[in-house]
């Protein structure tokens, strides 16, 4: 095996580790979500279709799955389907991917399983999304005028800026290794429509829905699993009694 081939193989093996390392350097905040809170999931669904579904698709999610979080077909059609489609349609968008690439530098990714795909050693996908949507700041060097500390040099603008307001990077004094040092962090410069606490709750609702969207059957799957385990637990004494009956002449 030549030296060049060995280097290529080594680089391929090392790449996943580097990718994880690059994504784990940011401290993620814990997302205060509750998958059993239907009111939160409904608010999150409304936020998703109003702020995310313009550019990002959810091609593996149908509107009628929102029945699982307490909405009926009429409520879904009246409040969440703005394209004139049907309640059984997939959550697709009209924007062409080539146009999106020209405008943003890259086509916005599908968000159906984004909460699952962003999980890493640094935290869950929910933690990553919760932190990401709260760490945008103004940056005049970027084409969109926005940057993000969780995802540096991201092409996406801050679509929730009217709610959060505008943050800018400001120096903060923090203690590290027994010494004080200056660290730049986003700080609110121009308030938005919501207070900081209300904005965090709004983001939590949106993230809660995106986690649900990644696996709508999670709740029923867990319920079925508990039922199966309970059935097996009740079956144990019957199986043991049957075993004793079969082997009583041997023992």
Image (spheres, rainbow, N blue to C red):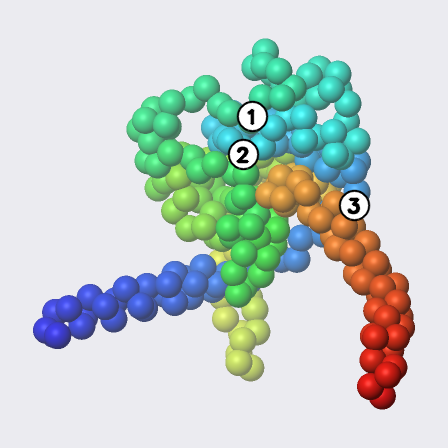
* Mark identifier at residue 36: 3
- Name which quarter of the figure residue 22 lies in: bottom left
Give yes or no for contact between labels 1 and 2 (Cβ–Cβ under 8 Å): yes
Residue tagged 1: 90
Give yes or no for contact between labels 1 and 3 (Cβ–Cβ under 8 Å): no
On screen, residue 182 versus residue 234, left or right, reads left
Disc with the residue nearer the chain's start (3 vs 2): 3
Given residues 88 and 44, the one toward you in this image is 88
Residue 168 at what x, y percent from top left? 51, 46
Determine whether 241 is above or below 105 in the image: below
* Mark identifier at residue 157: none
Q: Residues within 10 Å of mark 3 (few under 14, many from 20)?
A: few
Q: Secondary structure at mark 2?
A: strand
**Quarter of the rendering occupied by the N terminus:** bottom left
Given residues 14 and 151, the one toward you in this image is 14
Given residues 178 and 28, the one toward you in this image is 28
Q: Secondary structure at mark 1?
A: strand
Q: Which residue is depicted at the point 44% across and 38% down?
A: 109
Q: Residues within 10 Å of mark 1 (few under 14, many from 20)?
A: some
Residue 36 at what x, y percent from top left? 78, 45
* Mark identifier at residue 60: 2
Given residues 33 and 90, the one toward you in this image is 90
Q: Is residue 29 visible?
A: yes
Disc with the residue nearer the chain's start (1 vs 2): 2
Gap in angstroms between the C-alphas marked 1 and 3? 24 Å
Instruction: Indicate which label's residue lies in the foreground, 3 or 2.
Output: 2
On screen, residue 238 versus residue 96, left or right, reads right
């Amino acid at each position: 095996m030549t030296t060049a081939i060995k280097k290529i193989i080594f680089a391929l093996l090392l790449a996943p580790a580097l990718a994880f390392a690059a994504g784990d350097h940011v401290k993620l905040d814990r997302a205060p979500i509750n998958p059993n809170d239907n009111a939160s999931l409904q608010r999150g669904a409304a936020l998703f279709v109003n702020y995310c579904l313009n550019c990002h698709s959810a091609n593996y999610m149908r509107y009628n799955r929102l029945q699982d979080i307490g909405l009926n077909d009429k409520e879904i059609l009246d409040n969440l389907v703005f394209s004139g489609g049907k309640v059984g349609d997939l959550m697709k968008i009209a924007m062409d991917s080539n146009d999106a690439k020209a405008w943003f530098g890259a086509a916005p990714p599908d968000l159906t399983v984004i909460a699952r795909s962003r999980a890493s050693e640094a935290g869950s996908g929910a933690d990553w999304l919760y932190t990401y949507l709260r760490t945008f700041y103004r940056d005049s060097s970027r084409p969109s005028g926005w940057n993000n500390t969780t995802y540096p040099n991201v092409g996406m603008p801050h679509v929730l800026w009217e709610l959060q307001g505008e943050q800018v990077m400001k120096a903060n004094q923090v203690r590290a290794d027994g010494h004080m040092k200056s660290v730049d962090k986003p700080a609110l410069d121009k308030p938005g429509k919501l207070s900081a606490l209300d904005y965090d709750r709004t983001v939590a609702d949106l993230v809660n829905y995106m986690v649900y969207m990644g696996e709508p059957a999670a709740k029923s799957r867990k319920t079925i699993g508990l039922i199966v385990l309970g059935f097996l637990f009740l079956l144990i004494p019957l199986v043991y009694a049957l075993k004793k009956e079969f082997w009583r002449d041997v023992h």
